[in-house]
Amino acid sequence: MAANRRPTLADVAREVGVSAKTVSRVLNEDGPASTRTREQVLAAVAKLGFQPNLMARNIRVGGPDTTVGLVIPDLGNPFFGAVARSIEDTVRDRGLTLLMGSSADDPDRERALTDKFLARRISILMVVPSVGADHSHLKTHRAAGLPVVFLDRPGVGLSTDNVVSSNRAGTHDGVAHLIAHGHRRIGFIGDLPTKLYTRRERMAGYRTALQEAGLPYDRSLVTNAHDRHGACAATDQLLDLPDPPTALFAGNNIVALGIITELARSKRRDVAVVAFDDVELAEALEPALTVVAQDPEDIGRAAATTALARLDGDRSRARTLTVPTRLIVRGSGERLAPVLQES
């Protein structure tokens, strides 16, 4: 085979020693094929770098020829809604339609959703991985040429493209901002479960900022919450400590809403707050909320662009794209620590 020529179905068939029709049956999962034949075909596909024309395949077998499957954890979270809108806007230009479902951060539900999407012969699969999910079951589909992209969090058990935010650097910047305003006791309210990739990365950024400022890590200042109600309780717990924090860092937008609610309820206007991820109407609060803003539109656009490139035959190595965050100063994170207020 010439070095500058793309491998074809016939090349794969020749490598294995079977007919092109057999190779097609294996790749399209359309008809009987022994386990050994299937393994040999997929091995040859990987060896030769064969990239099936998925759009043509879908038209040929009568399945949807314009579908992209997206699995997100929560349809009600504005962040994932913005990511989905950006993906939809990007793939629409190629005549593709977005199908979306919620996993509720449950690995079994995520697997069921991906299986349903795959049964529809989607052209692209995008997933925000659930904690504890194993994505090795997608290897066959990936080897057959299906573009698979993980968003917000890397997948497990599958080498493919990832698009994530700069969680660690963003949190470091937010906590350093509080430190620069004199705060030495800074509480961190993160997400549950604690094994979540974004939670781990943001916690690492928190600890790095403290370390760089020569401040000790105090485990009593760190707690977690799953929802707004839990964040309210976590805020109350931290502020009730004998030596309470003078500032709080919210690990996500849901936690931020809980913190704001509890501070308003308890009429506490002396606690500085910085949140990871922006909050709707953040500028309407008093004071307005200082945030480390992600760029969900850019995340969705980068994921869709990467997937479309794969669909068009890009066979370069899997890569992780990191979308920068930015600190937006609005007021809540600029409250000075009491020691500076008194000086």
Image (cartoon, helix red, strand yellow):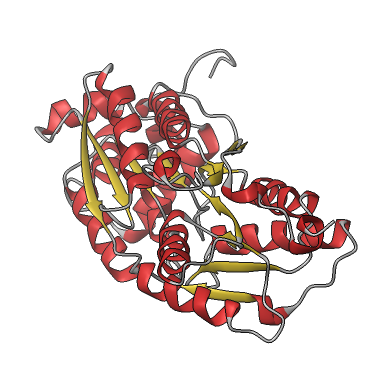
Q: Quadrant of the C terminus?
A: bottom right
Residue at the farthest left position: 62
Q: Quick one: 107 or 164, which is closer to the camera?
A: 164
Pinpoint residue 194: horizontal percent, then vertical percent.
55, 73
Q: Quadrant of residue 125?
A: top left
Q: Quadrant of residue 8?
A: top left
Above/below status of 311 relative to 279: above
Above/below status of 2 relative to 176: above
* Residue 326 horizontal side relative to residue 113, left or right: right
Residue at the farthest bottom position: 242
Tell me what residue is drawn at x 47 percent, y 44 percent.
278
Tell me what residue is drawn at x 55 percent, y 71 percent.
195
Q: Quick one: 294 or 105, which is closer to the camera?
A: 294
* Residue 60 horizontal side relative to residue 165, left or right: left
Q: How many marks?
A: 0
Pinpoint residue 184: horizontal percent, then vertical percent.
79, 65
* Residue 30 horizontal side relative to residue 206, left or right: left
Above/below status of 38 relative to 9: below
Pinpoint residue 5: horizontal percent, then vertical percent.
51, 14
**Is residue 64 something that shows in the picture?**
yes
**Is residue 19 something that shows in the picture?**
no
Tell me what residue is drawn at x 26 percent, y 42 percent.
69
Q: Quick one: 271 or 192, which is closer to the camera?
A: 271
Residue at the farthest right position: 214
Q: Quadrant of residue 328?
A: top right
